Every structure is written in structure tokens, then in C-alpha cells.
Image (tube, rainbow, N blue to C red):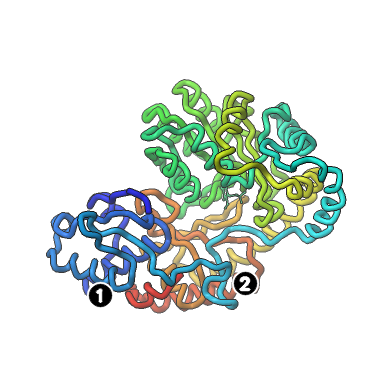
Amino acid sequence: MNDATLGPRALIGLLGDWRSGGAAYEDLAARIRLLVIDGRIAVGTRLPAERELAARLGLSRTTIAAAYARLRESEHLESLRGSGSVTRLPAAHITPLHPTGADSLDFTKAALPALPWLGEAARAAAERLPAYLGDPGYDPIGLPELRQAIAARYAARGLPTDPDEILVTIGAQHAISLLARTLIGRGDRALVESPTYPHAYEALRGAGARLVAVPVGGEPGASVHPVGDPPLGDGEAIAEAIRHASPSVAYLLPDFHNPTGRSLTELDRERVVDAASAQGTVLIADETTAELDIDRPFRAKPLAAYGPAVMIGSVGKTVWGGIRMGWIRADRGLIRRLLAQRAPNDLGTPILEQLLVSELLPRMDDILELRRTQLGERRAHLEQALAERFPQWTVPHVHGGLALWVHLGAPVSSQLALAARTHDLLITAGPRFGIDGAFERNLRIPLGFTAAETERALDALQAAWATMGGAPVVDADVLSAVV
Ligand SMILES: Cc1ncc(COP(=O)(O)O)c(C=O)c1O
């Protein structure tokens, strides 16, 4: 349970264009249920009082009461005496690894399968383990040889780094939440791009931040990384937002941004670090998807090469998501604060995992080349298949990253994602990537899947799209059965 309350204005923002041709109370209940299911409304959130919401929506109180009753029936809402109506998930709700059965496809993750030679590297790591078994094994900062190897990669990218400036974490997500807990005080402003990686803004919000969103990625559906120098764009927008809001931290995805795939130019990076330095904003640059350049060897300089910035890295997208290992590069003072903050939550990164990554880091150039080939083939296939099957959608040509941020031409992303579930495809609706209900016209389609998996997913999307017709309708009973 959290103690969040959603006011009528905020809820209406999240609802977006929720009417889909059915009875108003059914449509309203269906949309709120989807928002709870996909995490846009946290479980335990108090919804507006019926009368208040009715007035704001211009509907009768009876309609709102009927919608809330519907949500209570499907166990997505609980009315507590004295506390109003609070969102919840049904008791039967579980999120197993394969949520809708063995045949379902999970396109909610934009990731790649493990490296083919991971098993071999794991065996080599296991052979090195005995040398460490005499120690207690708790390692809050990271093995010296691994921190050395991570520092050397930054140095090779034009950012001299001392191993003392590296803290090894349990993946990039852990790095984000550790930084959020360390740097953010309740009510501080945190700037995020919009759209962005949802679990990052959740972590920032969870640490007490008030989010400030800056729109990035160009016009919806526009090519997000045109050949040649893009016009003044995201960098200026981010710098301007930093100057205006003076946030404590700004969380950015400078390269192959998730989900749009766009990258900041050098000029963008200069502008952003200048604005942040002037305002005392701590920049956090998440490079989890950065190295996945499809068209050429990755060569962008880290944001911290332009001015003060905390860097986050991970092997989750290059090696495998199942290896929970990432890192933070920061000045020594912040590394000390992070170490102090870490202990109450976890006592260090597994040694075996670290040995495995230290086996793999020297081979990173080969790993990235393999990923380039894989992603290049998969991008070509996905682009062609989308052009054939969905000529009415706008599909940007991205130069790297793990997804296409497709523009659907109509605000139907939630309904499409929901209908796709009935065809055994889990896919994340566009608004999940925004903080205010925007992006109902966008869908993130991962490009890391095989041709066969992609074809099956597109079959499901096509079938879902066909059922929606001109006025998509989602059956409220289907909603309660999904996830
Ligand atoms: C931008 C971004 N940051 C962080 C993460 C989480 O990375 P990790 O698996 O290393 O925790 C992801 C995973 O999707 C991501 O896309």
C-alpha cells in the first residue's frame, strides 16, 4: 500500500481519450483498470470521490458510482470506510515469468537473449571463484579488477576514470534507485525526459521526487535521428527545462534513448551540462542501451566527458538481462555517500556475477559487433513487416537501441495493447513511458526478437487491430482476466 491520492485532474490526465463507444461506466472502469494493471496508477492509490470526479468529467454521479462498482467487482478497487476508494489488484493477480502461458509472447521487455558464449564465460568465472572463497564474500563496492576494467572502458571513450570512481551495483535499475535515494529529498524536483524508461521515474518518485517532464524525441512519428545534424532539439529543450525548473537531479538517456531511439548531439550534451552546472543540478546519464549502435561501432563520448555527470552502465542489454550487474561512475564523495546508503537495502553484488562480467568486458567489442549484426537484421525485418502490415502507422528509422517508437495515427495504444493480450501478446502501451497519460498514439515495439517471434507478435497485433475497427471497444470482462 502506498499513501498516494490521485486528484480528479491528475486522473483525467491519465484517462486520456477513454471513451470507446460502450456505456460510459464500462468504458471508464475499463480504462482505470488498465491504468492499474500496467502500473500507471500505483496499487494503493486513493481515487477521487465520486461527486468530484463526476463534476470534472461532466457525468452523473451515478455513472461514476457504477464504474467504481464495476472496479470493485473485478477487485481492482476497494472502498474503505473513511479512506475512500483505493486501487488494488485482484488476489489472483500474479506475474509469473510467462504470464499468459507457454505460448504467449512477452514484448513488454525490450531486450536480447543471452550471448551465445555466456555458458563458456560462466565456467571460466566459476573456475576463478575458489580464490575468493576464503573471504566473507560481502562486496558493497565491487571487485578491484572489475572496477579497473570498467574504468578502462570509460578512459577509452575519452573519460579518464579512476577505479575508485566506480561502484558496482546489481544492475542499472539498482543504480538508479540507489542514486535516487541518495540524492533526492522529499519534494525535490527531478527532471525526466518524456517519454522515458518507466522504472526510472518510478524510482525517482518513490524517493520522494516531484517529477518535471521535458518532451523529447521530436514530433510523434518523426524520424528521431535524421542523417546529418538534427535541428535544435532535445538538448536545448532539456537545458531550458533545467534552467527553468532548477531540479535537484535530471535523469537522461543520452544515447539510443528508450523508447524513441534518439541520441543527443555533441552540442546537445554541451548545452545540457552547462545548464546543469549553472543550476547545481546533478545529471544522471543512463547508458544501459547506449552501446547498441546498429549502424557503426558505438563512439559517443559519455556525458561526463563534457562536464559533471553521474554515469550509469549495465551489461543487461549487451550481455544478458539475467546477469544482474551494473555500475555507477561518480566522484569519490558521492561514491562514499552511495555506499552508506546501500547497506540497509543490500549488502553487495554477487562475486560470481562480477567474475563473469570481468571475463566478458575485455571482449566487449566482439559482443557489440555481434549485437550490431543481430539488431541490424531484426530491425530490417521489423521495419519491412510493419510497412507491409500496418501501412497507416509511422515507423521511425532508428540507428540504435532496442525498440521502435511507432506512431499509430490515433490515440488507441492502450486499447491495442489490451486487445493484443487476448491474442497472447503482452506489449506495453505508449502512455506507460510518459508520466502524465500522454503517448496514447505511440506503441513501443521491441526489435530484439527473432523473425519468427516478431511475425507471431505482428499476427497478434493485426488481429487485435482488426477487432478495434474505427471505434475500438474493449470488453471489461477481458480486462479483469488479463495480466
Ligand atoms: C534505460 C534503462 N535503464 C535501466 C534498465 C535496467 O537495467 P538492468 O537490467 O541493468 O537493471 C533498463 C532495462 O530495460 C533500461 O532500458
In-front residue for pair 350/151: 350
- Number of numbered discs: 2
Q: What residue type is disc 1 on? A: Gly
In-front residue for pair 403/360: 360
- Tell me what residue is drawn at x 81 percent, y 47 percent: 359
Disc 2 to disc 1, C-alpha distance: 33 Å
Sequence-first disc among 2 and 1: 1
Residue wearing tag 2:
453
- Tell me what residue is drawn at x 29 percent, y 61 percent: 17
In this rendering, is residue 307 above or below 198? above
Q: Position of residue 199 (x, y in %)?
A: 49, 50
Question: Does the numbered disc 1 mark a residue whose Cβ is under 8 Å from ligand 1?
Answer: no
- Tell me what residue is drawn at x 67 percent, y 58 percent: 375
Q: Position of residue 270 (x, y in %)?
A: 55, 27
Q: What residue type is disc 2 on? A: Glu
Q: Give the secondary structure at mark 2.
A: helix
Query: With 451 as the anchor, is 366 left or right in this view?
Result: right
Residue wearing tag 1:
22
Q: Position of residue 379 (x, y in %)?
A: 63, 61
In this rendering, is residue 339 above or below 477? above
Farthest-out residue, top: 278
Query: With 34 as the anchor, is 116 left or right in this view?
Result: right
Does residue 425 appear anywhere in the picture?
A: yes
- Tell me what residue is drawn at x 81 percent, y 58 percent: 117
Does residue 236 appear anywhere in the picture?
A: no
Query: With 134 as the anchor, is 459 left or right in this view?
Result: left
Q: Position of residue 306 (x, y in %)?
A: 60, 26
